[in-house]
Amino acid sequence: MRRTTTTRRVSAVFACWGAAQLAAPGGCARTLTPGAPVPPTRLVRVLGARLVLQHALVLARPTRGIVLAGAAVDVLHAASMVPAALRWREYRRPAAVSAGSALTSALAQVATAPAAPRH
């Protein structure tokens, strides 16, 4: 299997996860953090939209640079969840799940990124 095929499969999974957040933000939050307060719907939708756009770009052009840039965005998102969890304690569990999902995406992208072109 070509490396770009694996890259695209990883991005398809995360694009679908983003689409689910867009379509059913409250349901996604309740499923992953039962008993925790649900973050504002618009916030979950914005994060879902970011995933859809990011991974649609990778699906369209799975170059090493684009894949690694997406991984960097995911790492920044995960890092942003730390102050969010500290500021809004009631959303600590959803923030931790969001950070974990972003880190998982980043690691999967780095692991499956196409090789750098040889010169």
Image: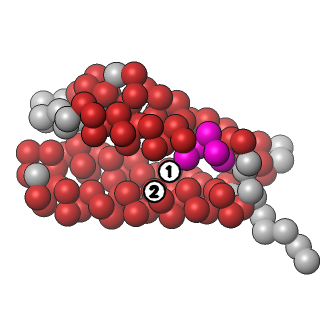
* Residue 26 shows in the view: yes
Q: Is residue 56 highlighted in magenta? A: yes
Q: Secondary structure at mark 1?
A: helix
Residue 86 screen position, x and y as percent: 13, 60
Amino acid at dot 2: Asp
Q: Secondary structure at mark 2?
A: helix
Q: Residues within 10 Å of mark 1 (few under 14, many from 20)?
A: many
Residue at 74%, 56% in the rendered image: 63
Residue 41 screen position, x and y as percent: 25, 31
Residue at 64%, 56% in the rendered image: 67
Which residue in the structure is indicated by mark 2? 74
In the picture, measured across the screen, residue 29 lies left or right of residue 104, that is left
Q: Main secondary structure of the magenta part?
A: helix
- How many labels sit on residues? 2
* Residue 10 shows in the view: no
Residue at 10%, 52% in the rendered image: 88
Q: Disc 1, disc 2: CB below 8 Å?
A: yes
In the picture, measured across the screen, residue 19 lies left or right of residue 42, that is right
- Magenta residues, start to end: 54-58
Residue 100 screen position, x and y as percent: 36, 51
Quarter occupied by residue 26:
top left
In the picture, measured across the screen, residue 98 lies left or right of residue 106, that is left
